[in-house]
Image (cartoon, rainbow, N blue to C red):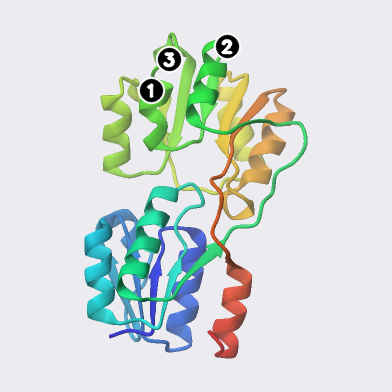
Amino acid sequence: MVDILLFGGTTEGRELSEALKRKNVPSMVCVATEYGESLLEPGGSLQVHAGRLDEAAMAALMEREQPRLVLDATHPYADGVSRCIQRACAATGMTYRRVLRQSAMEEGCLTFPDMAALIDWLKRQEGVIFSSLGSKEARALSEIPGFEQRVWLRVLPSLEGLEGCLQAGFPARHIICMQGPFSRELNEAMFRAAGAGILVTKESGAAGGFTEKLAAARACGMTTAVLARPKDADGLTAAEWLRRIEEGTI
């Protein structure tokens, strides 16, 4: 049994798991992939569960571990996963709280409510597109005419993500597998190497290097198209949760 069940796989999730371990709080952090597991250091009071969980498996895990608090530190755009966690908590009577990522949105960006609207706009544009949306959106981006020559993808360095991009039809030379966040200088070097005129990205906040991406895109004279965030549940920022862990009030 654990006190805190943390769904992670993000920068915030890693920071919270490290703090929980440091304060010796009995905890379990769940990540979807082996790559996510490799970024954590289990031991002491911290356990790690690696592997994707559906709603039923989440509920079974909650029933077994009986945490007094379930923290959702999944990616701001992983709304499907968050809904599963919320439903599993409701089914098992567990307390659910969201770890919020603060916005870093700036003026001068084009914002789209969903992938359908974004893809429709991209189909009507010309020039090279640099996407940092991640591998899950590769299939949708393959709908863009001439995507094999026009679209570059930057994705996490996981075998699963790379295979998804290749299966969507993207050539290996247009796939960059790297772990961010990246500096403005490195972003700019990648954008210029691709010859990109459009940056397609998510509003990933400071933790996701959003500010550095925008600065690099401006330096390159690019248009920035942002996929809007899903609406978050109520919660606290990672900084606020970290303070509570340090104070022993979580």
Q: Position of residue 71 (x, y in %)?
A: 45, 70
The total number of labels drawn is 3
Asked which secondary structure carries label 3, the reply is helix
| Residue under label 3 | 147
Answer above or below: position of 57 versus 114: below
Q: Are marks 2 and 1 in contact (CB under 8 Å)?
A: no
Residue 195 placement: quadrant? top right
Looking at the rendered structure, the secondary structure element under dot 1 is helix
Query: In which quadrant of the rendered view does residue 237 lie?
Result: bottom right
Q: In the visual, does 36 lie left or right of 19?
A: left
Position of residue 231 relative to residue 11, above or below, is: above
Label 3, label 2: how far apart the Cα atoms are: 10 Å
Q: Residue at x 34, y 20 (%)?
A: 171
Instruction: Give above or below for 145 relative to 10.
Output: above
**Nearest to N terminus: mark 3 or mark 2:** 2
The residue labelled by disc 2 is 127
- Residue kind at label 1, given as amino acid type: Arg
Residue drawn at x 50%, y 60% is: 11
Nearer the observer: mark 1 or 3; the answer is 3
Amino acid beneath label 2:
Gly
Disc number at residue 219? none
- Identify which residue is drawn at 54% across, 24% down: 117
- The residue tagged 1 is 173
